Structure formats: structure tokens, C-alpha cells
Amino acid sequence: MRGEVWIVDLGYQGKIRPCVVISQEPEDIDRDLRTVAPFTTQPRRSRFEVPLDVPALSREKSVVDAQNLMTTTSSKFLRKVGRLSGVQLDEVCAAARAWLEL
């Protein structure tokens, strides 16, 4: 799932929106959790936002908000809508690392 773009029900945290999965795939012994970075159509020009062109989401210009990372269960993943290229995923992960100072 890492690098895939899904429509995710983020519940009270942030409604239903497209997100990119940035965490690795959990093993059977791990909790069924995935960390995602949501897309937003209301950028703030933050250094932690990554503008991306994902054809399935081309209705409006959007950015991935790496400052708003969320972890949720796979049951909240509604449907897959795309996949980032390796370069795009690297950009999102770099922004997340910068935000978390990793």
C-alpha cells in the first residue's frame, strides 16, 4: 500500500479525503494501522506541503499536507484512486521527515 492514494474516512480528524499511504505494510503480528498524509485543496504555501499531479484527483489543484499525518485502520480506506511515482513518494516522505525532524 505504501505510495498508494486512497480515499480515506478520517472521521472526526478530517472528513473523507484522498490520502497517500507513507507507512510500511504491517505484518500479521502488528496492529492493522497505516499512516497517511492527506491531500488538501487549501494550501498555505507551507514548506511541508508537496504539490502533486495525480490524474484521478485533477478536479482541483491540490497538495499533500505532510504536516497533518494521521494513522488509521485499513477499514477506513474506501477505495484506491492512484499511486505516486517513486520520486513523488520521496518528496512526500522528505517533507514528513522535515516536519518531524527525523
Image (cartoon, rainbow, N blue to C red):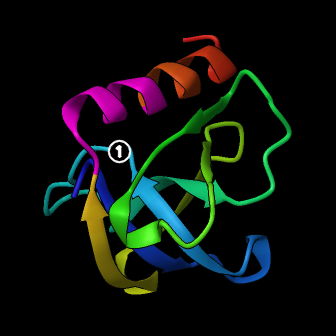
In this figure, which residue is indicated by the disc labeled 1? 23
Three-letter code for the amino acid on which mark 1 is drawn = Ser
Quadrant of image for the C terminus: top right
- Residue 62, image x and y in percent? 62, 54
The answer to whether residue 51 is visible is yes
The local crowd at label 1, few if under 14, some if 14 to 19, many if 20 or more residues have their Cα within 10 Å, is some
> Helix, strand or loop at disc 1?
loop
**In the image, residue 19 above or below residue 68:** below
Name the side, left or right, on which 31 lies relative to 57.
Answer: left
What residue lies at 62% left-to-right and 38% top-to-bottom?
Answer: 66
- Residue 83, image x and y in percent? 25, 56
The answer to whether residue 73 is visible is no
Name the side, left or right, on which 97 lies relative to 41.
Answer: left
Q: Main secondary structure of the magenta part?
A: helix
What residue lies at 21% left-to-right and 32% top-to-bottom?
Answer: 86
Q: Nearer the viewer, residue 17 or 36?
A: 17
Quarter-of-image position of residue 100: top right
Q: Which residues are magenta?
A: 84-92
